[in-house]
Image (cartoon, helix red, strand yellow):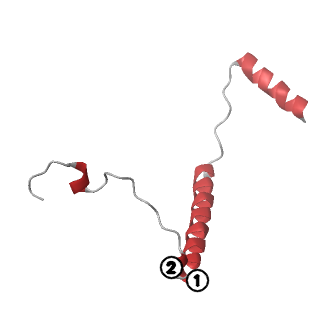
Amino acid sequence: MAIWSEMRNIVRWLLRRSDPPPPPGTGQRIQAAEQAVARRRLLSDAQTARTTPQHCQPTKNLPTGTLDHEATPGRADR
């Protein structure tokens, strides 16, 4: 099988032909599959959030300097 694909590639190179475009709707199928994976991940995260007590959920630290008053240390209107 690999020999035939290699032969096809050589013939295409010799004839300077590009690969044919993918069949119509391929991009839509790929996008639908990616959206389904993302939807399952969101639902799984939501289920975990509902079943885990609030005090057990991990917190996220924000980087310093993200708040407006921290970004300008010498402001006079504090």
Name the spot of residue 73 as percent of width and height, x first. Answer: 20, 49
Residue 27 image offset from top left, x and y in percent: 59, 50
The N terminus sits in image quarter: top right
Residue 21 is marked as none
The answer to which of 38 and 25 lies nearer the viewer is: 38
Q: Tell me the distance, in whole angstroms, between the alpha carbons under discs 1 and 2.
A: 12 Å
Label count reads 2
Circle 2 residue: 55
Nearest the viewer among 36 and 27 is 36
Residue drawn at the location 65% of the way across and 42% of the way down: 22
The answer to which of 22 and 37 lies nearer the viewer is 37
Question: Which type of secondary structure does the marked residue at label 2 adopt?
Answer: helix
- For the residues labelled 1 and 2, say whether their Cβ atoms are less than 8 Å apart: no
Splitting the image into 4 quarters, where does residue 29 fall?
Answer: bottom right
15 in relation to 77, above or below: above
Comparing 36 with 44, the one in front is 44
Residue shown at 59% from the left, 60% from the top: 32
x then y, percent, for residue 37 = 62, 63
At label 1, the amino acid type is: Thr
Residue highlighted by disc 1:
51
